[in-house]
Amino acid sequence: MTLTLDHPQALQLRRLLEAGLPLVSRPYAWLAEQLGASEDAVLEQVRQWNEGGLFRRVGVVLKHRALGYRANAMLVLDVPDAAVDAIGRQLGAAPGVNLCYQRPRRLPQWRYNLFCMVHGREREQVERQIERLLAEQGLSELPHQLLFSTRAFKQCGGRFAPPAERAHG
Amino acid sequence: MHLDALSRRLIDRFQHGMPLCAEPYRAMAEELGCAETEVLACLQQLEAGGGLSRIGPVFEHSRAGASTLVALAVPPVRLEAVAERINRFPEVNHNYLREHRYNLWFVLTGPDRAHLDRVLAEIEADTGLVPLDLPMQSAYRIDLGFPLGDLP
């Protein structure tokens, strides 16, 4: 038992956290057992990471498709570079927009540089919602496309920590 | 899947944040005014119904490592095989079919950008398809969960 985690233990804890907490009464004690550390040391490390901004949130993470949000649209826009920050902030603050990111163009294959996600129950409803949104914001004239998802092949959290063999080797 | 009243309250209350303590499910139960076993049963039910991704941290991509959004233009006859190959990479999450010439969209995450470059090269070598590599440059809004108000 250790009071603080060493580097390999901290890395292993990150890998375990990426997969989520187990559904047992004392999930951090379970994690600590995997690491050969104490429950207190694991909790302290998780709190430090949380305060340091490593996490966006710690909570219940849902799969929206199974919960009825089946119409999932990626709205992509071709925004003049000089206006992308202003328009990005404007769209990011709009109701119903879940994500709003600037990404690079890849010409000639890909011209769009602003990406928004809008989720809803019905496709027609999401289409109308986005048309209305663009009209209200005065952005209907910008070249844009709606890419609806029709199937989820995989939906899980990101794996950032290096794999174990690399971490130890 | 159908959500009962307690599941809805639990999700509404704890999507954005949950107690960081030794017995988080007991602390959640206290806030909801129910028993810890009911919270655990709710979460197990949500998991069995396919509605739960996981419980715990959502990592801040820029702090946790590197990530990028990738698109492939996959000929329809090869879709199943290519999607299955892409899914096998542990670096891949959120792999979706979308209606576009670029029809397969997924997020790659890894410890650093060099790691992602290696995966992208491997994808291109394996599939013969040139990936569109679209890393985030600015975030104007990040995903913080879903409102349950209008759920079926």
Image: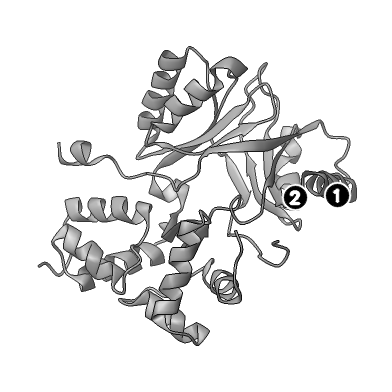
- The disc placed on residue A91 is 2
Residue projecting furthest to the left: A1
Camera-nearest residue between B40 and A48 = B40
Amino acid carrying label 2: it is Leu
Residue B75 in view (yes/no): no
Q: Which residue is mark 1?
A: A137
Q: Is residue B101 left or right of residue B110?
A: right
Label 2: how many Cα within 10 Å (few below 14, some 14–19, many 20+): many
Q: Is residue A124 left or right of residue A39?
A: right
**Scheme of colours in the image:** one colour
* Residue occupying the point 52% across, 16% down: B130
Relative to A38, residue B28 above or below: below
Task: Point out residue B83 in the picture as x, y percentages from the top left corner.
Answer: 50, 27
Mark 2 and mark 1 lie on one chain; the one further toward the N terminus is 2
Camera-nearest residue between B149 and A146 = B149
Relative to A15, residue A106 above or below: above
Cβ–Cβ under 8 Å for marks 2 and 1: yes
Camera-nearest residue between B61 and B34 = B34
* Residue occupying the point 81% across, 46% down: A130
